[in-house]
Image: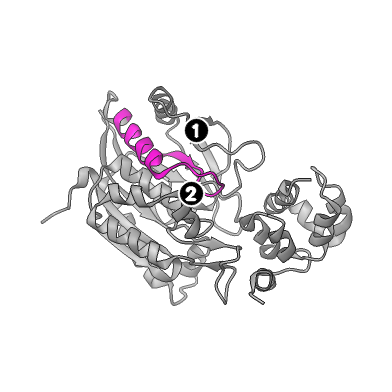
Amino acid sequence: MAEIVGGVGVPHTPHFPGIVDREEPLGSQLRRLYGAAARHLRDLAPDVLIFFTCDHYNIFFVESVPIFSIGVAPSAPGPSDYRELQAYLVPIASDLARHLQVAAVRGGFDVVMSQEFDFDHPVTVPLHFLTPEMDVPIVPVFINGLIPPLPSAARCHALGARIREALTGMPGSVRVAAVASGSFSLEIGGPRLSATSHTGIPDPDWASRVLDLMRAGDVGRLVAEATEERLTHAGNAAGELLTWIAMLGVVGDGPAVFLEAQPEFGHAFGCWLAGGRRGPG
Amino acid sequence: MSIYAVNKVCYRVVHEPELRRDLTDVPEQALRAATPALSEEELQALLAGDVGLLSRLGANHFLLHQLGRFRLLGLDLPTYAERIRAAYRPD
């Protein structure tokens, strides 16, 4: 059977790779934070990553907007939306992806499959820092966190748990980690932007509350409080939190072993061990 | 017409360099060729870079800000942000 080994959650701000490359003042902090998540993943030695992401109006906007989709292509290039960023061909564990899509549907989750697509920056920016060699294939799970109506937090957590159940029931031996990508409070281009930018952090208190609950391992409370109304209040990209909640459904509820915020961005970097383990000591 | 027509133009801006070129060189022609068709109010607002009005009409902000990001229709990101702020500034 597959072994769930842990997970990470990180932001995907498209300017971060350039800030690190140009060694701007924020670069050393970003290098440290992404480095912590990358080191955690390396120590977990996963064979595959279940990667929860929200399409940013690049794959699904025109034809349809699925609430949940799993990408089953053998690989996909990206990023499609920021051509100035480094381009990658991201390997996909397509057989496992198809297996999980079937298992999800048979488990009562109407998860569609996506057969041909390009990734956008919410996938490639995290991988740029976490697995830049692209030597760990992913199973991309798209959650509609940006275009209302959003799925409920409970449904996202349950989907993660269903994926965990399907993985642990599989024959063979494979080590699986889960990845979440996104912010807790973020407004892009909307009326709640800051005084100096086209983005804003409308609800820093919510971002702080999310951190407290993750730090305590109180995922049940987090799921209960992360209503669509609350997420909408926290910004038009705050639904990205749903990727973290789904990731925790895979990993199993428990406190983070590493969690550090960048409050000025409304997001954080977090690491978990499977099954709520608290790590050495 | 639904505000979807405006959102779709903004979506296409990200993925179609030739549309970005046309919106720079022949903006009205490019907008009149859009499908689905823009309403006259939407088309004039886009030509004027009036993102405050488009916001009030219900355009998606994530997509709308791409006009500023790609410096189209007289916008850049600071101008975009200022026009959105102005549209929601209390009197």
Q: Start and end of the magenta stretch?
A: A138-166
Res A161 quadrant in image? top left
Say which amino acid is labelled 2.
Val
Q: Is residue A39 left or right of residue B51?
A: left
Location of residue B34 in the rendering, given as x and y in whole percent from the top left corner: 82, 47
User: Which numbered tag is attached to residue A74?
Assistant: 1
Quadrant of image for the N terminus of chain B: top right
User: Which numbered tag is attached to residue A63?
Assistant: none
On the same chain, marks 2 and 1? The answer is yes
Q: Nearest to the eye among marks 2 and 1: give it.
A: 2
Say which amino acid is labelled 1.
Pro
Location of residue A2 in the rendering, given as x and y in whole percent from the top left corner: 27, 31
Mark 1 belongs to chain:
A
Marks 2 and 1, how far apart in space? 16 Å
Q: Earlier in the sequence, mark 2 or mark 1?
A: 1
Crowding at dot 2, Cα within 10 Å, few <14 / some 14-19 / many 20+, comes out as: many
Q: What residue sits 67% from the left and 53% below the top?
A: B14
Residue A155 is one of the magenta-drawn residues: yes
